[in-house]
Each structure stands twice: as structure tokens, then as C-alpha cells.
Image (spheres, helix red, strand yellow):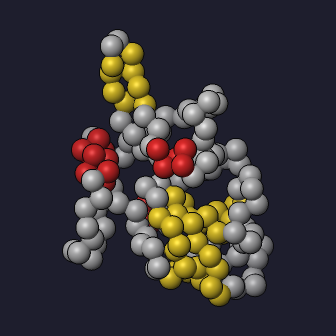
Amino acid sequence: MVEIPRSLRSLFSAPIEERDGTYIVEVPSSEVNHEAVSADETYRVAILESPSSTESSMQQESQQRPSRESGSPAPSEPPVDEGEVRDVTIETVGDQGDGIAKVERGYVVIVPDAQPGDEPTVEIEQVQENVAFASIVDSDQRSL
């Protein structure tokens, strides 16, 4: 499992493309729209190994947002849906004080007002490609 540093501002998958002799990693517009990054700033970028050689084709398919009528999410789709209620375990706290939980495939769920060790029941309110935002609907008071 990859350890998430407190300074993490954004996490997304993107292919590396060659353009005019340079290599480009495109930042999804949703990262700017949700103020995870600003177009006029400079950031450090970490490159993590892709879990499979078919990652690029899966990313392109996920950008087209296929429906989930089959009931089982494709590997490139987020493993949660808006409105879904589930139990999570808060693993750490982000820079802005929100709890961070990880679910299937290391997908990150941000939970305000949660602390490491909390095991709340949350409702998923907003789903993005690599992160979801949830609110607590039932709190387990046990924490580390």
C-alpha cells in the first residue's frame, strides 16, 4: 500500500504523451475546478508504477464515463457511487484537517470531521476519478 503524505494536494491518473519532442502529463480540469491545483503554480509530481500495461486504454475509457448498469465497476472506474452509504476506517488526516479513508484499490475518500482510527458510516456525496467526498451519517466513537 502506498503511504499518502500530508502534503498531497491531488491524486489522479494520466498518460504521458509526446508532443513536439517533449513529454506531457495533462492535469484533469476537475483538479483545477475543485481547487486542488492552480494553473499558475508549480508543483512536484510523483510517478507511480501503473498496475497493468492496459492502464492507458482503461483511463481513456474512464474519461468517457461508461454507465454502471452491469452492477460491477470496471477497474478504471471509481469503486464508489454518489449516494452510496458505507463503513470506512479513517487512516490519516489531510492538510485541511479532513479525515482520509481508503477503500478498494486504494481509492481515497475524504471525510470532514473525522480522525485517524474513527470508523464512521458515510454517505458518498461527490465522486471524482481518483477521490470521493463523503459526510458522516453515523459515527463510531472509537478511535486510536
Q: Count the marks: how many?
A: 0
* Residue 61 screen position, x and y as percent: 25, 51
Q: Residue at x 74, y 72 (%)?
A: 113
* Residue 32 screen position, x and y as percent: 55, 44
Q: Residue at x 70, y 56 (%)?
A: 94
The answer to whether one can see residue 106 in this image is: no
* Rendered image quadrant of residue 93: bottom right
Residue that protrudes farthest toward the left in the picture: 70
In the depicted view, which residue is nearer to us: 144 or 14? Answer: 14
In the depicted view, which residue is nearer to us: 70 or 39? Answer: 39
Reply above or below: 4 against 113: above
Report the side of 20 relative to 6 (left or right).
left
Report the side of 49 relative to 20 (left or right).
right
* Residue 12 screen position, x and y as percent: 47, 46
| Quarter the C terminus occupies | bottom right
In the depicted view, which residue is nearer to us: 64 or 59? Answer: 64
Q: Residue at x 46, y 44 (%)?
A: 29
* Rendered image quadrant of residue 70: bottom left
* Residue 87 screen position, x and y as percent: 56, 80
Q: Residue at x 62, y 30 (%)?
A: 40
The answer to whether one can see residue 119 in this image is: yes
Residue that protrudes farthest toward the top in the picture: 21
* Rendered image quadrant of residue 80: bottom left
Report the side of 139 relative to 31 (left or right).
right
